[in-house]
């Protein structure tokens, strides 16, 4: 049965859906976190200073629990490398990377090197994990362009929890030959910002407890954390800064901009610098995506400040043809979380405290990008993204609260992830076009392992600044088809394509592909 969330809710409210594991209504009620149904209070500024993650100095990366002191509260988090966020790894292009993951958690984990092109056995596939108390050795050459990449766990059905609890860090590739002549801000003026929303405003602790509604939409929060600090501030000069921004949330799509509407320049995306700086007043960034921007604070008065935030926005609605049963009623009201996409949230404040002595010009051209030609593609593959009724047997359902029957699940081409099944086979060296078709009414940021791609087109609107250059993650809005072009010429082996809404991924919205 092919359907989506709206169809599911209408069927549920009309008692047209029978489940084998007992009373459906009671099961849904039991599986929900009723606290989600209260009004969400967006947390404000905390008056805490921004913290920069430590820099990795080689050797072992320990995964384990850690107590954080946040506003006088002791918060239990999970950490890599003894830090939340994890240490920033900085290496030059062409360097050899080597690290030992030591798992001190009570559950299995691993590391996916998001955006980096690495051998399949090093990529962090969920079949390649360190058991509790075990270890895993990572070794690979750094082949990719200078850019802002990142790393996070990728165990099957547990990626969202581990990432949410604090296990993520940046991996910055440097290439002085490609960037030095551009005169971009460096040192203290080159600032990484990892954005993650958490349900923290009222509870003052990290709790990852998704309800059934949260699995449908993703686990959205009420407080924005930047580099592990809730709604911080940074004192800056009235000059130009380079910010490397990662949307490290499990599900929240962000519209990034300044409260006063001032412009900034996009200079890079997932795979490094783009051809030319693009002036904008906001950018949409979905989970897993990165953007590099230049911000000139000279327009802000000395000793003044400006708030950086995620602005109000509305995602494109799915066409009626993709939601044949229309709206939501009855049971649907209880199935919807009070946490919503598109709400305004403060991220951090910049305080103008110093007069700059630097002279930084916004480059008109950056680094040339090799453009892949659609005419060179030998195959086009289609990936249909949807929610469908899928059966499960024994134990509890993937969403909790049921012991057997059918359940709405996130699928690609009607399939749930299976660890050993190869879903797509690709010839080594091939150039292909992939079409991501969103058949439902939730956004899906689609991520491809093992290579980078370029975005060719969107069926809704035009390409944005964040779509430019080399990419590994792209937002596919409800009802939208996004076409990308990829070349598989670095490594053979088994890789993944999946939704980077991590609740959707853990629910099964992931497929294997093999390059051979």
Image: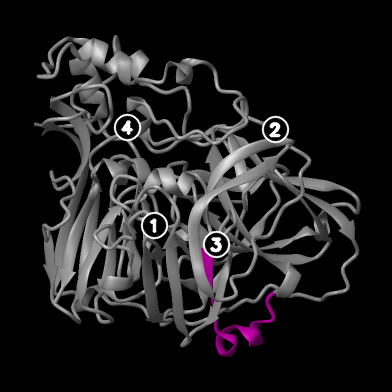
Given residues 111 and 335, the one toward you in this image is 111
Mark 4 / mark 3, whichever is N-terminal: 3
Residue 174: in magenta span: yes
Between label 3 and label 1, give the one nearer the viewer: 1
Q: Which residue is labeled 4 in the image?
A: 216
Instruction: Tell me the SS state at disc 3.
Output: loop
- Where is 416 relative to 331, above or below? below
User: Given contact means CB atoms under 8 Å apart, are the residues at marks 1 and 2 in contact?
Assistant: no
- Where is 419 relative to 328, above or below? below
Q: Which residue is labeled 3 in the image?
A: 81
Q: CA distance from mark 1 to mark 4?
A: 33 Å
Residue 468 visible within the image: no
Mark 1 / mark 2, whichever is N-terminal: 2
Q: CA distance from mark 3 to mark 1?
A: 15 Å
- Magenta residue span: 170-184
Given residues 23 and 329, the one toward you in this image is 23
Q: Which residue is labeled 1 in the image?
A: 133
Q: Residues within 10 Å of mark 1 (few under 14, many from 20)?
A: few
Given residues 102 and 388, the one toward you in this image is 102
Horizontal side of 496 relative to 78 (left or right) equals left
Quarter of the figure with residue 137: bottom left
- The residue shown at (56%, 59%) is 86
Where is residue 38 shown, x and y percent of the image? 51, 15
- The residue shown at (62%, 25%) is 202
Where is residue 324 shown, x and y percent of the image? 18, 26
């Amino acid at each position: 049965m092919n359907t989506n969330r709206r169809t599911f809710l209408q069927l549920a409210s009309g008692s047209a859906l029978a489940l084998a594991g007992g009373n459906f209504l009671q099961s849904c009620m039991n599986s929900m976190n009723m606290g989600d149904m209260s009004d969400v209070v967006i947390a404000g500024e905390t008056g805490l200073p921004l913290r920069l993650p430590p820099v990795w100095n080689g050797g072992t990366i320990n995964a384990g629990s850690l107590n954080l002191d946040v506003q006088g509260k002791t918060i239990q988090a999970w950490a890599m490398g003894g830090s939340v966020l994890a240490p920033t790894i900085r290496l030059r292009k062409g360097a050899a990377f080597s690290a030992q993951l030591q798992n001190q958690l009570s559950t299995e984990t691993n590391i996916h090197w998001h955006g980096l092109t690495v051998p399949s056995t090093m990529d962090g596939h969920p079949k390649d994990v360190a058991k509790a108390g075990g270890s895993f050795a990572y070794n690979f050459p750094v082949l990719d362009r200078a850019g802002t990449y990142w790393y996070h766990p990728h165990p099957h059905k547990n990626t969202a929890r581990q990432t949410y609890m604090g296990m993520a860090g940046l991996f910055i590739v440097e290439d002085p030959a490609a960037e030095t002549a551009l005169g971009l801000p460096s040192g203290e003026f080159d600032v990484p910002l990892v954005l993650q929303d958490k349900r923290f405003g009222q509870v003052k602790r990290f709790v990852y407890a998704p309800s059934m509604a949260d699995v449908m939409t993703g686990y959205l929060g009420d407080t924005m954390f930047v580099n592990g600090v809730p709604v911080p501030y940074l004192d800056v000069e009235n000059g130009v800064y380079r910010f490397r921004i990662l949307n490290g949330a499990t599900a929240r799509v962000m519209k990034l901009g300044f409260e006063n509407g001032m412009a900034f320049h996009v200079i890079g995306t997932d795979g490094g610098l783009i051809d030319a700086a693009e002036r904008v007043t906001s950018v949409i960034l979905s989970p897993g995506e990165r953007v590099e921007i230049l911000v000139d604070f000279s327009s802000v008065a000395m000793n003044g400040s400006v708030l950086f935030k995620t602005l109000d926005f509305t995602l494109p609605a799915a066409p009626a043809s993709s939601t044949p049963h229309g709206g939501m009623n009855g049971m649907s009201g209880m199935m919807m979380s009070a946490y919503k996409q598109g709400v305004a949230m403060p991220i951090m404040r910049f305080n103008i405290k110093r007069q700059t002595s630097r002279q930084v010009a916004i480059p008109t051209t950056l680094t040339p990008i090799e453009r892949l030609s659609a005419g060179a593609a030998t195959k086009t593959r289609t990936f249909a993204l949807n929610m469908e009724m899928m059966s499960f047997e024994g134990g509890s359902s993937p969403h909790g609260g049921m012991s057997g029957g059918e359940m709405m699940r996130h699928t690609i081409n009607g399939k749930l992830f299976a660890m050993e099944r190869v879903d797509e086979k690709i010839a080594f060296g091939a150039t292909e076009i992939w079409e991501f078709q969103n058949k439902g009414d939730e956004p899906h940021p689609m991520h491809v392992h093992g290579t980078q791609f370029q975005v060719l087109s969107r069926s809704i609107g035009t390409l944005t600044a964040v779509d430019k250059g080399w990419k590994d993650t792209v937002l596919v809005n409800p009802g939208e088809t996004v076409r990308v072009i990829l070349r598989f010429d670095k490594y053979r082996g088994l890789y993944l394509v999946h939704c980077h809404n991590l609740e959707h991924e853990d629910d099964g919205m992931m497929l294997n592909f093999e390059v051979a």
